[in-house]
Image: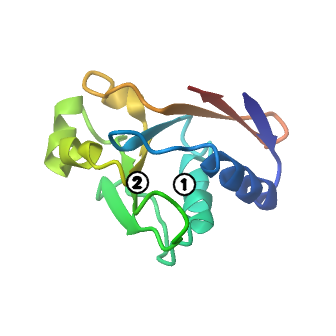
Amino acid sequence: MEQTIRTLAELETEATRFLNTLVPGERATLVTLSGDLGAGKTAFTKTVAWALGVEESVTSPTFVLEKIYKIEKPDFPFKHLVHIDAYRLEEGAELAALGFDELMKDSSNLILLEWPEKVADILPVPTVKISITVNIDDSRTISYAR
């Protein structure tokens, strides 16, 4: 499935629609976000956090690698939004320092991981793969693969 996004309002609507398609499984729900620098991976994560009622300011975890937010939406099945940016990692083994294996064991975690190609050697199969591309008119195309 693909969606073309032209405005922040459209991105917020799309994030809400996407969230409504997720169903927790036996482990964390892993969503990978691919795209060039500036494509909108963090913007997508911010709108997901907004739709989940996260009240903290959501920023890129490029330098801290991981941020965990408590989900304040009582009717939503996930309790934590985990935002990981693997851009600075050299290999998947570096995810261990973030407690990635433990995070994956908790089915109440929704994990959004940017730059999955950097850690592909150890990643489990994601629930959803998202690719974001910038179009010539500066709109974004969001492609989903399950």
Q: Are marks 1 and 2 in contact (CB under 8 Å)?
A: yes
Looking at this view, is 33 or 138 the one in front?
33
Quadrant (top left, top right, bottom left, bottom right) of the N terminus:
top right
Amino acid type assigned to the residue bearing label 2 in the image: His
Give the labeled residue for mark 2: 83
On screen, residue 74 versus residue 29, left or right, reads right
Q: Residue furthest top?
A: 121
Mark 1 surroundings: few (<14), some (14-19) or many (≥20) residues within 10 A? many
Q: Residue furthest bottom?
A: 55
On screen, residue 75 versus residue 108, left or right, reads right
Amino acid type assigned to the residue bearing label 1 in the image: Thr
Query: Is residue 91 in view from this perspective?
Result: no
Mark 2 surroundings: few (<14), some (14-19) or many (≥20) residues within 10 A? many
Looking at this view, is 24 or 13 the one in front?
24
Image-quadrant location for residue 69: bottom left
- Determine the secondary structure under disc 1: helix
On screen, residue 11 versus residue 70, left or right, reads right
Q: Give residue 79's position: percent from left, percent from top.
A: 40, 63
- Determine the secondary structure under disc 2: strand
**Cα–Cα span, label 1 and label 2:** 8 Å
Q: Give residue 95's position: percent from left, percent from top.
A: 22, 40
Residue at (72%, 59%) from the top-left corner?
12
Q: Is residue 57 above or below residue 1?
A: below
